[in-house]
Image (cartoon, rainbow, N blue to C red):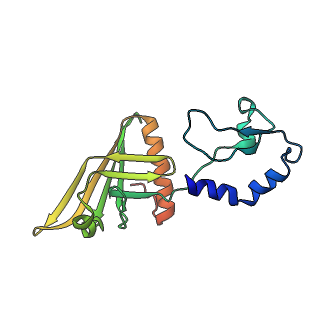
Amino acid sequence: MATLQSLALASPVFHSMLLQPRSLSGIPTWVAHRSSNSQFNGQSLLVARSLLSPTTWNSKKCGPIVMMVKPKIQFIQGTDEQTIPDVRLTKSRDGTNGMAIFRFDQPSVFDSSSEVGDITGFYMIDEEGVLQSVNVNAKFVNGKPAGIEAKYIMRTPRDWDRFMRFMERYSNENGLQFVKK
């Protein structure tokens, strides 16, 4: 707490507010006071209030804040898979469900699994969140790991659309192409 308070007191913004406690550029301000229930003992700050109240904000003007995350695949959470998979898609005739089959030859997870931990699932991560499956099978040749096959099942058109958005981002990032057979 002492560090936060000393940083606030050392700030040139804090000193300018002490010297001239007024509205900023004609925008009304309000003061944030310490709550009697709070253990924070910092100084009060002047904060500029928005010209629009939160209920009248227009999403076209303010827009959502989107954090760009590089699309990636993981078998162990926190460890990105470096091998680019071969992906096969199937979809029912009525379009209500489908399956994606990912085949990884000599995946990098085998190199790091002894140090990092066990394979816990199949995770596809992008800016929208995480798609995951536990349908993961390893292939062994002469007792040594040779590949991984992971299946992701889509049960609704919404699941399909979400998966396709992930694949579009992942393929753009990794140079994959869609080939219809």
Of 97 and 112, nearer the camera is 112
Q: Kindly identify the residue that appears in the image at 42 percent across and 47 percent down.
A: 130
Q: Kindly identify the residue that appears in the image at 24 percent across and 64 percent down.
A: 113
Name the spot of residue 46 as percent of width and height, x first.
Answer: 76, 44
Q: Viewed as shown, does residue 140 lie left or right of 83? A: left
> Can you say which quadrant of the picture contains the C terminus?
bottom left
Q: Residue furthest left?
A: 142
Q: Viewed as shown, does residue 14 lie left or right of 116? A: right
Number of numbered discs visible in the structure rendering: 0
Query: Please, is residue 138 above or below residue 46 in the view?
Result: below
Of 58 and 89, nearer the camera is 58
Name the spot of residue 92 as percent of width and height, x first.
Answer: 36, 38
Name the spot of residue 20 as percent of width and height, x first.
Answer: 86, 50
Q: Kindly identify the residue that appears in the image at 31 percent across and 46 percent down.
A: 133
- Kindly indicate the quadrant of the structure image that contains residue 78: bottom left
Name the spot of residue 44 as percent of width and height, x first.
Answer: 70, 44
- Kindly indicate the quadrant of the structure image that contains residue 85: bottom left
Q: Residue furthest top?
A: 55
- Kindly indicate the quadrant of the structure image that contains residue 83: bottom left
Q: Kindly identify the residue that appears in the image at 30 percent across and 68 percent down.
A: 108
